[in-house]
Amino acid sequence: MSQTKVNDELQIQAVSHSLVRSAIAGIGVSLPSKVVTNRELEKLVDTSDEWIETRTGIRERRIAEPNMTTSDLCFEAATKSLADAKLTPQDLDLIIVCTVTPDTPVPATACILQDRLGAKQAAAFDLNGGCTGFMYGLATASQFVSTGKFKNVLVIGADLLSRITNWQDRGTCILFGDGAGAVIVSPSKDQAYGLLDFHLRADGSGAPLLKVEAGGAKLPASVITAEKRQHFLQMEGRQVFKFAVHAILDGVNTLLKRNELTVDDIDCFVFHQANLRILENAAKQLKIPSEKIISNVQKYGNTSSASVPIALEEARREKKFKKGSYVILVGFGAGLTWASALLRW
Ligand code: ACO
């Protein structure tokens, strides 16, 4: 090994020894109270309760009332996660809101939330990672905590996909729901527990598979874009399905291999809740017993960036893991993007 490489290696070792282990210190969830069943969607588009449940597993979803905003859901989820972590808004150093449906394009929803919480010390920004947003946000928060730069980071996955859903398109409108899930990332009390590893990927060549065409700099909002319904989410369902299964396999296998673990060592798998068939397909290929896979897509549909923290909170409540358990989280979505995390609770 050359002297430069030896020096680099020593430097990396020195840095990793000085890193703080980060951990999830609190979780909070917010879901609109209004339930929309598959039967109600039968009145909007040519579909059936039976088709939706057989192809997706979804039975109902939560849809926000018209006066509700993304920051409203963020506020409730954030308040609950702070209480869970026994912290106050003044303890926050950074707020990351992961969303594709911010209250407004400018300013960031994270800033609206920062003000509403009264988190005077906190920096704030939004992150657009599609449905992978929360996982990208979690990894970002972890880096800030690990380096010692920040102590408490609030990460929220929040989306009102109902606002960008084309309610005339049966290929997409049956899938989505609204919600928010928040976590607090703080230093772990014990180096052996917490967020152990991340795997983050993107493949921009898949951008056309999942997109909102108008409303950005390329195609600003106009009467024409509104008439053409270009402000709504468009998706190539079959291709996204294949990508989603690949994303879960890559996310899980990479973390298992790198950390010398097997499926048997993991107590709980929390995957993005897009479609029950995606979860079942991936579980079969990975040989994961069904009881280790969290699925709540039946109740909430695909809540985009919120789905992983909502499912994590549900898994914790149902005691699907305990202190010392290994848990793997995987998100995937527009971009295309995907990301996984290994944590020891
Ligand atoms: N009701 C009834 N029939 C329907 C509906 C509906 N809601 N939607 C489509 N169909 C029809 C189609 O027109 C087609 O009819 P044809 O055979 O006469 O042409 C037939 O059903 C089959 O259509 P497919 O699109 O092949 O159905 P598929 O089994 O692939 O299911 C689905 C579609 C549910 C969208 C699936 O492809 C899927 O889940 N894809 C992945 C979505 C996803 O993972 N998104 C996550 C990332 S995106 C994000 O998180 C924001």
Image (cartoon, rainbow, N blue to C red):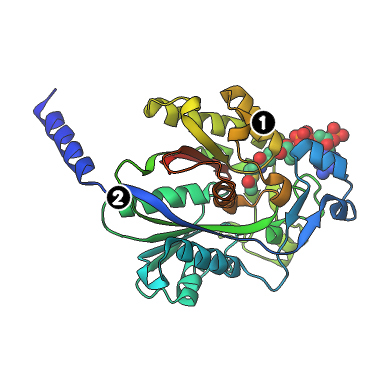
Decide if residue 200 is in sight here.
Answer: no
- At 38% from the left and 50% from the top, the residue drawn is 23
- Quickly name the residue at label 1: 280
Which numbered disc, 1 or 2, marks the residue that appears first in the sequence?
Answer: 2
- Quickly name the residue at label 2: 146
Q: Which mark is residue 156?
A: none
Decide if residue 275 is in sight here.
Answer: yes
Side of 284 where 331 appears, left or right: left
- At 26% from the left and 51% from the top, the residue drawn is 147
Side of 191 where 176 appears, left or right: right
Q: Where residue 317 sits in the image (x, y, percent)? A: 57, 50
Q: How crowded is mark 1: few (under 14 residues within 10 Å), some or many (20 or more)?
A: some
Side of 86 where 53 appears, left or right: right
User: Is the CB–ligand 1 distance for label 1 below 8 Å?
Assistant: no
Ligand 1 falls in which quarter? top right
Task: Give the camera-side residue of 319 and 188.
Answer: 319
Q: Give the amino acid type for the residue marked by disc 1 in the picture.
A: Glu
Q: Give the amino acid type for the residue marked by disc 2 in the picture.
A: Ser
